[in-house]
Each structure stands twice: as structure tokens, then as C-alpha cells.
Amino acid sequence: MMKSKRAAVLALLVLVFPFFSTPVPAEEEFSATVQRFAYHFPDLTVIGMPRWYRIAPKDTLLDIARRNGLGYNSVDLLFPKMDAWIPPRGKRIFIPTLWVLPPTQYQQLVINIPELRLYYFDRASSTVQTYPIGIGDEGWESPLGTFSIVQKRPNPSWYIPASLQAEYGMAVMPPGPDNPLGAFIMKFSAGAYGIHGTSMPWGVGRLVSHGCIRCYPEHIRLLYPQVAVGTKLEIIYEPVKYGQKNGEIYVEAHPDVYKKIPDYTKYALEKLAQCPFANRVDMRKLKVALSLQNGVPTDITLLSFKDGSLKYVGLSKE
């Protein structure tokens, strides 16, 4: 499971033992294009398509995550035993570029804390974009609730909280390469919090901030011009999501990053009971997915409800 302390240890290793890391690629290598996925509630709520990736000679897992529009948590959950700095060169690995859409009331901006991911809905075209994020660390948890975007600023200065000014030796940090807000910020109606870029891209997919939402520099550039002041923002806490695609049922299970769920399995089953397709779920497949909590949408449809000639209830095709 992803732990902020582990992230801190990894970061410390890079600083103290630089030979463990590979050269940081230029930002241009991670240029992004807007990826839009069609959706239609309630029968098409699984978007994207998984892909395969062959590890190149100078790749780290952090590079691989960023190149594929993922946060570090996505590859860490899938490959917990793989060396993050020197993964096996030439190995072909699975890239989980598919997602179950989170529940939403407004279909505008939605952030789901346990999966460390943001969704931007365009209701006019019934399309959605999704981006990985970094969130608040332990003791600095990102806020939950329904808010709205109240201000947008390019090249923002960082007005440092009083509790951190001694650490940074200043009250206001001007724009520049060391500014943790990056090139753009969108403030939302929760006090000092915002959605912004970052001067430390490897923090995306980790618990790293003081509560703000961090995006890759190339992603905030895409998102910033699309989001208008006044846009509704829902920040939810949903470690287990259920969805449908082509008549099949999927579950996407993530770790309980802020330790809010006393009984994870009970919680997941209660969520399932609220779904109209609960009787079509293979419980054995569901329990495996809940035990793994690897963040990958998993087909949990009972075989008897699948198309084709096989009709053995409860048996898996795997």
C-alpha cells in the first residue's frame, strides 16, 4: 500500500544517494494532449483502455507513470516489488489506463482522494478528461465537500502560511522554478486551497502537499484554460467504485489512504447493495479485487450474465 512515509524515504534516497536515480528527462518528453472519453450514466461509466509498455533503458517507474498519464501510486500499487529507479529493462508491463467514473452530482470537476485523481466533465459533449494528482499528506489532509472555483492565476506567487514561514525564510515566494504552485493555480472555496501545478512532478500520485491538489505541469496547462470561475468542484472520498461497460460490471478498489473506513469489505458490500446490478456480480472475483486494492478496474460480472455460450454461474473465465 502507498504510504507517504515511504515516499519521503524514496525522496531522501535520491538526495543522499543520487546514483540510485536516473537523469530527469526534459519536461518536453512528457508533453500531453487532451484525452477525452465518452461516458453515459448509468450504463457507460468505465472509460479508457489498458495498454502495454516496454521499459526503456533509462526509464524509472516515475517516468513510466508520467508518460502514461498516471500518478506514481498507480504503478506502485501494481508493481510493489519492482525497483522504482532501475526497473527491468525491456520488460513489457501492463499500464492501467482505464478508470471507473466516480459518483458525481454536478458532472463538472470531481476529485477522488483515495485514487489521487481528478475528473473534468464536459456535459455538452458527454466527454470526460482525467488527470492524476498529488494530495495532502498526513496531518495536512485535503478537504472534502462541494466547492466552486473562485479565482484563477497564472504564474502565481505563494503566500506562505504563517506556520511554514520560518521553514522557508519568507512570507511570499515569487513565481519561479522553486515555487511549489507551478505555472497556474485555480483557487477553490475552501480557504487557502487550490488546484495547481508543481515544481516537483514526482509528487503526483503521492501524499505530499499541505492540502492543495497538485497536477503535472503539462496537465495543469491543459486543464487551466478549460475550467471557468464558478465551476463546481466535488472532492469525495470513495475508495471503491462500481461501473458498467458493454453490459459488464467492474469494480475499482483503492487503499483507504486517510484511514477513514473501519471495515473495508463491509463498506464495499454496502456500496454494492445500492447498485441495481448487484445480483450480476461474481462475489469471488469481487473479494479478490477488494483484497488487492490495486486501483485497476476489474471485471466482476457473473459468467451467466456474459454474452456467449458459457453459462456456468459463478465460474471465472480466467
Image (spheres, rainbow, N blue to C red):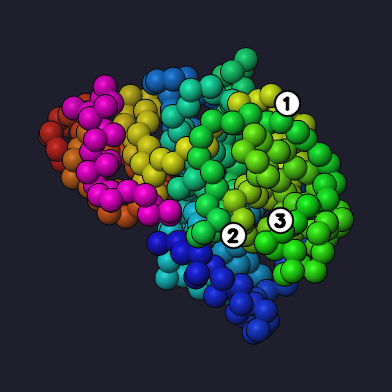
Q: CA distance from mark 1 to mark 2?
A: 26 Å
Mark 3 lies on a secondary structure that is loop
In the picture of the structure, the residue carrying the numbered disc 2 is 208
Badge nearest the viewer, 3 or 2 = 3
Q: Which residues are magenta?
A: 255-279
Residue 29 pos. (x, y %): 75, 55
| Sequence-wise first label, 1 or 2 | 2
Q: Residue at x 47, y 37 (%)?
A: 236
| Marks 1 and 3 close (CB-CB < 8 Å) | no
Q: Residue at x 62, y 47 (%)?
A: 213
Badge 1: how crowded within 10 Å, few (<14), some, or many (20+)? some
Q: Identify the image quadrant of the N terminus.
A: bottom left
Q: Amino acid at mark 2?
A: Val
Q: Is residue 41 magenta?
A: no
Q: Amino acid at mark 1?
A: Ala
Q: Residue at x 78, y 44 (%)?
A: 184
